Amino acid sequence: MGNTDHKAVISAALEKHASTNGALLPILHEIQDVLGYIPTDAIDVIGKSINRSRAEVHGVVSFYHHFRTQKPGRHIIQVCRSEACQAVGSEKIIDKLKLSLGIDFHESTLDGQITLEPIYCLGHCACAPALMVNGEPRAKMTSDQVESLLNELRATNHDD
């Protein structure tokens, strides 16, 4: 998330995509890729730029689980909730993550370091249960590996 000037990021995404057909999703993806979320004040600006209502833009943002309207934590853990992952123990991993972090899905730790999100199929069904940490897949996870994963993430917080 290099450029965190929201207005500049939104303007750049609009300039790049607003005149193309089906511009809404590319605009939203570009903003989230840079900022990590879609600021709520961007919804009106986007709608006006592509001749869509605020409700239409908000509807798309809220429909797709991928889009966030809150700034995420420094690290994002996305746990696969597909049937294949559930069949081999993802629920135990989810329970352990929620307990260890003290948060539920779509929440961040109080220190703003870790966000926990559900995701629906990472395409690693043969290596289930799987999760994604900061965009990097982790396969064949066990609940016993959760604490070491969280320690690894917490350690990177102090290295920067």
Image: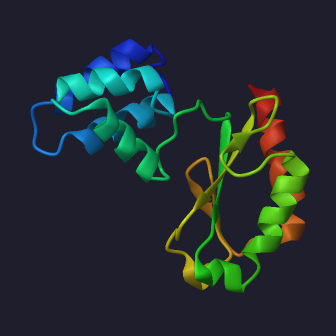
Q: Residue at x 19, y 24 (%)?
A: 49
Q: How is the image coloured?
A: rainbow
Residue 4 place in picture, x, y as percent: 48, 18
Q: Residue at x 77, y 64 (%)?
A: 94
Q: Which is more toward the observer, 111 or 39?
A: 39
Q: Residue at x 82, y 57 (%)?
A: 97
Left or right, 105 with reference to 34: right
Q: At 19% across and 40% down in the image, what residue appears?
A: 23
| Residue 122 higher or lower than 134, as above or below | below
The answer to whether residue 50 is visible is yes
Coordinates of residue 58 in the picture (x, y in percent): 38, 38
Q: Classify the position of the C terminus by image quarter.
A: top right
* Frontmost residue, 55 versus 38: 55
Q: Is residue 81 above or below residue 37?
A: below
Q: Is residue 13 visible?
A: no
Q: Is residue 141 left or right of residue 138?
A: right
Residue 75, image x, y percentages: 68, 40
Q: Position of residue 13 (x, y in %)?
A: 27, 27
Front one among 135 and 83: 83
Query: Relative to the observer, which residue lies in front, 106 or 123?
Result: 106
Q: Could you say which quadrant of the image residue 62 lies in?
A: top left
